[in-house]
């Protein structure tokens, strides 16, 4: 090879013709047919022809000569039938050099007005254009097998289909963005599905590449912009709960399941309800729940016998309605728990069950599992029994109602005294009570976001919390005494104790919460350090939590009402539901945070009190106490802050959809 030789190389999936200007140390400087100089390794050259052009010609003349050469070579491509050559040669499965392949393509009596270099170039160009049948290196060709050819043809069809999809999808999206009305029929539905999947799952979407290229074709380059497009297309609402899609949560129930709830009507007849149950309908049974609650699953009663009290904790007997391995049980298992968010409630069981048949509504007969607890005059537990019962709730109270009458109603006062004594018992046993306000968020009838700080230590909330802990503890003891496995909840000791005897500031309680060990679920009981109890189960919410339904069934088995789960079945249930329950917690936490940030979007520029929690490398972590919201405060904007210091911050920017909040020291 010498200066002036015409050569070829591949650049960006195209064969380029060039003339050699200079050769130095295995590298060549070339002038291409596009009038561009390039410097390449000699190894990249495909066709090192002997044909030469005099370099004394002007640059444009050289480019014209190259252009003429390319035209001549391209004109010869049609004489090369790659598929026909493969059909003749593929059984040999051997490499074929460029000279031999050129002889196959061009016989000696073929067109005379051509050079060997032009013929070889035409062969290379033809095989480069049709790469279905042969693979090639710089100077040889190897026929693919029949299976490989089939795969190559299928891939080519898919590439063509995908190119059309991207081109048409990009054009459709551009039109959709410019038009006020968008047609999602036909191909539009397919494009919408691709974009929705990409938004939800990003790189894990099977449409990831297609969606990315469609968006690029339409000039869209941000995830936020894509969400706004999906809202405009009517695929999402402005406040869409994306997690429901990501975690595959169905917000409603299949029609065939809804229809089957009608068969429960016969189970509500008095004769069916009272059979083999203790009649407790003469007791003054009440429920205490949130103001908007419809699914009442636990109720209380208190009797004063002069020398002692009898406390009743009555749990709706969901096992009476929902049998093992039935369609309702299977649906509940798949969901694992009800989901409560500020704008939506998704029950674990169909609404007719959770809000009617299995709800302890005032005035309705209901089957229950009742924990009847004997207490001394000083409110110490002296004994208990668990019985199948039938009850009738006299009144559904809200927490607000109970707080109003807490100093006047003797029954409520007694319940408060019992709860306080049980808390003292737990604290003496090492319990850790973390007193932090709760932020309650809901969307009212006018679609306004209502945010309210709830005192979890109000009389009503305190008594319900403590008595339900007591009931769960006693049900755990009951199952242990009868050697029945259950879904026991335990908790190792905390890494450190900051607040003693349940006392402490907001700062101390926040930090104590971080030092708690994670709870553990298992089929055998262990100590629960946070509650200060030797055993614990949750069984007071069987219409809301599948774990509680399982435990209630174990209690029913001791009462002779059904067959118990074996230990291995309990272990398997825990294993299978752990991820689902984690998803439920994440969905509820994310949605509460979304609506809180949505509320704060209107508070930009406002000042709030905050407590410094800790200093990290690049920021301070602070707690905005009005909303119990932890935020990062840039360390560059302030210096010298100390943990537990009270400061004031200004909300600078909030974006609920992007889960972003930024604050500045006021």
Image (spheres, grey):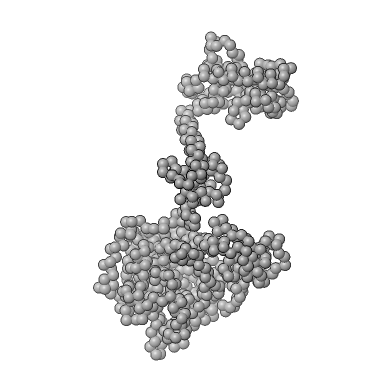
Report the side of 229 relative to 610 (left or right). Answer: left
- Image quadrant in which the N terminus is located: top right
**In the image, what residue occupies the spot 49% across and 42% down?**
175
Q: Residue furthest front?
A: 180
Question: Does residue 98 appear to the left or right of 172 in the view shown?
Answer: right
Question: Is residue 582 in view from this perspective?
Answer: no
Of residue 607 and residue 656, the one placed in the foreground of this image is 607
Name the spot of residue 535 as percent of width and height, x first. 47, 73
**Farthest-out residue, bottom:** 306
Nearer-the-camera pick, 266 or 655:
655
Is residue 160 something that shows in the picture?
yes
Q: Position of residue 637 (x, y in %)?
A: 70, 62
Quarter of the picture containing the C terminus is bottom right
* Residue 324 image offset from top left, x and y in percent: 34, 62
* Point 42% across, 59% down: residue: 335
Farthest left residue in view: 271
Q: Is residue 652 left or right of residue 402?
A: right
Residue 2 locus on image (x, y percent)? 71, 19
- Residue visible at 55% across and 18% down? 75
* Residue 33: quarter of image: top right
The image shows residue 80, relative to residue 400, as above or below, that is: above
Vertical side of 507 occupied by 378: above or below: below
Q: Nearer the viewer, residue 242 or 248?
A: 242
């Amino acid at each position: 090879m010498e200066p002036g030789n015409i050569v070829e190389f591949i650049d960006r999936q195209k064969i380029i013709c060039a003339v050699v200007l200079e050769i130095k140390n295995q590298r060549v400087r070339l002038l291409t047919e596009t009038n561009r100089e390039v410097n390449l390794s000699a190894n990249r050259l495909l066709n090192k022809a002997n044909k030469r052009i005099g370099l004394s010609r002007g640059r444009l003349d050289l480019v014209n000569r190259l252009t003429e050469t390319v035209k001549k070579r391209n004109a010869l491509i049609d004489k090369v039938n790659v598929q026909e050559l493969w059909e003749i040669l593929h059984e040999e499965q051997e490499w074929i050099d460029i000279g031999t392949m050129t002889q196959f393509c061009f016989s000696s009596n073929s067109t005379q007005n051509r050079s060997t270099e032009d013929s070889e170039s035409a062969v290379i160009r033809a095989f480069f254009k049709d790469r279905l049948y042969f693979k090639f290196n710089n100077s040889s060709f190897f026929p693919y097998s029949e299976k490989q050819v089939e795969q190559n043809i299928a891939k080519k069809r898919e590439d063509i289909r995908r190119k059309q999809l991207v081109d048409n999808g990009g054009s459709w999206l551009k039109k959709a963005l410019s038009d006020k009305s968008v047609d999602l029929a036909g191909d539009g539905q397919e494009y919408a599905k691709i974009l929705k999947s990409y938004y939800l799952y990003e790189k894990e979407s099977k449409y990831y590449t297609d969606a990315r290229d469609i968006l690029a074709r339409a000039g869209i380059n941000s995830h936020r912009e894509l969400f706004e497009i999906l809202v405009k297309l009517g695929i999402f609402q402005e406040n869409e709960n994306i997690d429901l899609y990501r975690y595959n949560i169905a917000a409603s129930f299949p029609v065939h399941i809804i229809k089957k709830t009608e068969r429960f009507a016969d189970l509500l007849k008095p004769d069916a309800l009272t059979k083999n149950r203790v009649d407790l309908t003469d007791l003054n049974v009440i429920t205490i729940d949130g103001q908007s609650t419809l699914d009442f699953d636990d109720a209380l009663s208190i009797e004063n016998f002069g020398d002692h009290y009898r406390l009743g904790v009555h749990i709706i007997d969901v096992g009476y309605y929902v049998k093992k391995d039935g369609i309702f049980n299977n649906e509940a298992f798949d969901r694992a728990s009800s989901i409560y968010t500020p704008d939506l409630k998704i029950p674990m069981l169909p609404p007719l069950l959770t809000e009617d048949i299995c709800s302890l509504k005032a005035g309705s007969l209901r089957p229950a599992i009742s924990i009847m607890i004997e207490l001394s005059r000083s409110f110490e537990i002296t004994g208990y029994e668990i019985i199948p019962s039938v009850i009738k709730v006299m009144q559904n109270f809200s927490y607000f109602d109970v707080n109003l009458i807490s100093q006047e109603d003797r029954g409520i006062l007694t319940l408060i005294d019992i709860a306080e004594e049980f808390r003292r018992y737990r604290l003496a046993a090492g319990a850790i009570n973390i007193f932090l306000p709760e932020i309650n968020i809901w969307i009212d009838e006018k679609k306004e976001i209502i945010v309210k700080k709830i005192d979890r230590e109000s009389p009503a909330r305190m008594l319900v919390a403590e008595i339900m802990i007591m009931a769960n503890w006693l049900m755990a003891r009951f199952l242990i005494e009868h050697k029945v496995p259950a879904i026991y909840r335990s908790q190792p000791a905390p890494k450190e104790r900051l607040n003693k005897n349940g006392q402490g500031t907001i700062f101390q309680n926040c930090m104590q919460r971080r030092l708690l060990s994670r709870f553990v679920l298992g089929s055998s009981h262990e100590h629960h350090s946070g509650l200060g109890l030797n055993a614990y189960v949750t069984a007071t919410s069987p219409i809301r939590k599948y774990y509680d339904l399982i435990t209630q069934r174990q209690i029913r088995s001791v009462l002779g009402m059904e067959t118990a789960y074996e230990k291995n079945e309990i272990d398997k249930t825990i294993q299978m539901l752990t991820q689902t329950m984690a998803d439920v917690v994440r969905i509820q936490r994310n949605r509460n945070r979304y609506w809180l940030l949505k509320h704060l979007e209107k508070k930009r520029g406002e000042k709030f009190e905050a407590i410094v929690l800790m200093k990290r490398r690049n920021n301070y972590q602070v707690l905005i106490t009005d909303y119990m919201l932890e935020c990062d405060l840039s360390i560059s904007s302030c210096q010298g802050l100390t943990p537990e210091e009270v400061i004031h911050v200004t909300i600078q920017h909030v974006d609920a959809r992007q889960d972003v909040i930024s604050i500045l020291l006021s």
